Image (tube, grey):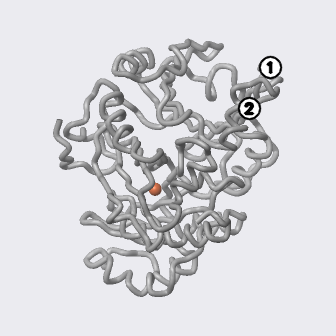
């Protein structure tokens, strides 16, 4: 199987050479978090990130064991789920991992086939295909485990016209903060344990038909103190990208080790969401209390024109404005990208968000890794976990 990727433009449906088509994916359907208090989490994601009230399921809709709030912003759907009783796998998940991502749901044409194709290639089942119905039609869902206790749910909704899923009702709220310009999920990153990266790279190749289209080793991703390795997996049409990180030996504890220690397992490290106006989005998020990593030193911004080279001529943003908001810049052969990382969004130093604006570049900000990780290490030092 060739690993060469040619003629692929981000977002276009050109098949990555080498990717297999036994698992056609239409996109990310939703991301479900298991949390300690979904009502309060929903308030946070509405207020701070500008998500909109979308759907609800709980005691009022006939559920006895849990409550779920669905939030939406453009194409992004977040589901926040909490247990109502102590004897619940949802509660157990939160007890072990803290608030975190349980389900990365993938939108498919045929959920039964997706389940059959992946389980026959070795995926561990989470949920056999289930048909859920209401007056708006039916949805078929089935799930498999990926790293840690994280799940990929396949969602087939071609025969459904309802708000979200059967069992959910539309959620109307009197409190509707405006959106912040978040459009869709660009990529979602998993942290796995020592020497596990290649195991999961192979799992995504064999079980999901993905290809490894970018790799970074510890020579490229390191600071004075710590290191990590990363490989980016993509499905055939390039819509789904899952970088996988593992820690590497360094003088001090890397952010990946810190994550593994506090999540107590492999799991989702960050969700990167795309915007087409990062300056406006980040200014808005900051005004609403979202905390970002501290800015890199002045020298970082002084070096931007040299780093961008030919792309400097197409750059629309004012570097002083980017510096004012601590936004990072990187470039590859095809263009440049702008990105910024939040601090963890819960008390355990685990899950965080990335805001990204791609201006042609298809990379992941490799040129920023050093500045970014030094920034994370300053935060780790404050937590006493470096
Ligand atoms: Fe990222």
SS for tag 1?
A: loop
The numbered dot on residue 304 is none
Residue at image x 33%, y 69%? 331
Single out the mark in the foreground, 2 or 1. Answer: 2
Residue at image x 53%, y 31%? 151
> Which quadrant does the C terminus fall into?
bottom right
Residue 280 position within the rendered picture, expressed as x and y whole percent measured from the top left: 57, 68
Q: Quadrant of residue 57?
A: top right
Left or right placement of residue 206 versus residue 53 in this view: left
Residue 362 position within the rendered picture, expressed as x and y whole percent measured from the top left: 33, 57
Residue 344 position within the rendered picture, expressed as x and y whole percent measured from the top left: 63, 57
The numbered dot on residue 91 is 2
| Crowd rating for badge 2 (residues with CA inside 10 Å; few <14, some 14–19, many 20+) | many
Q: Closer to the N terminus: mark 2 or mark 1?
A: 1
Residue at image x 24%, y 48%? 8
Q: Quadrant of residue 282?
A: bottom right
Q: Is mark 1 within 8 Å of ligand 1?
A: no
Give the Cα separation between the discs numbered 2 and 1: 14 Å
Left or right placement of residue 165 versus residue 121 in this view: right
Left or right placement of residue 274 versus residue 203 in this view: right
Residue 243 vs 28, above or below: the answer is below
The numbered dot on residue 64 is 1
């Amino acid at each position: 199987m060739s690993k060469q990727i040619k003629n692929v433009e981000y977002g276009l449906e050109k098949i990555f050479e080498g990717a297999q088509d036994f698992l056609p994916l239409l996109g990310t359907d939703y991301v479900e978090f298991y949390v300690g208090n979904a009502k309060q989490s929903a308030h946070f994601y509405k207020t701070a990130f500008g998500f909109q009230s979308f759907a609800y399921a709980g005691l009022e809709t006939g559920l006895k064991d849990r409550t779920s709030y669905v939030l939406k912003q453009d194409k992004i759907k977040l589901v926040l789920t909490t247990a109502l009783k102590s004897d619940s796998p949802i509660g157990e998940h939160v007890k072990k991992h803290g608030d975190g991502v349980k389900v990365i749901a993938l939108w498919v044409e045929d959920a039964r086939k997706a389940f059959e194709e992946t389980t026959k290639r070795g995926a561990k089942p989470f949920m056999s295909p289930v048909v859920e119905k209401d007056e708006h039609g039916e949805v078929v869902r089935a799930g498999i485990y990926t790293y840690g206790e994280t799940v990929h749910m396949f969602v087939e909704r071609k025969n459904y016209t309802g708000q979200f899923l059967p069992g959910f009702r539309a959620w109307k709220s009197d409190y509707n903060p405006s959106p912040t310009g978040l459009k869709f999920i660009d990529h979602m990153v998993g942290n796995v344990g020592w020497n596990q990266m290649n195991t999961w790279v192979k799992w995504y190749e064999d079980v999901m038909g993905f290809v490894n289209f970018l790799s970074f080793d510890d020579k490229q991703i390191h600071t004075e103190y710590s290191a990590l390795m990363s490989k980016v997996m993509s499905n055939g049409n390039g819509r789904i990208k899952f970088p996988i990180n593992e820690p590497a030996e360094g003088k001090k504890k890397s952010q990946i080790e810190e994550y593994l220690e506090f999540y107590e397992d492999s799991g989702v490290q960050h969700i990167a969401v795309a915007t087409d106006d990062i300056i406006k989005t980040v200014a808005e998020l900051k005004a609403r209390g979202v905390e970002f990593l501290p800015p890199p030193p002045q020298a970082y911004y002084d070096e931007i024109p040299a780093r961008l080279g030919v792309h400097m001529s197409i750059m629309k943003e004012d570097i002083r404005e980017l510096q004012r908001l601590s936004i990072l810049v990187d470039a590859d052969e095809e263009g440049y990208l702008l990105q910024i990382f939040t601090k963890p969004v819960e008390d355990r130093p685990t899950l965080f968000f990335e805001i990204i604006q791609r201006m042609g570049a298809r990379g992941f900000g490799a040129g920023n890794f050093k500045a970014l990780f030094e920034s994370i290490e300053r935060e780790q030092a404050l937590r006493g976990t470096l």
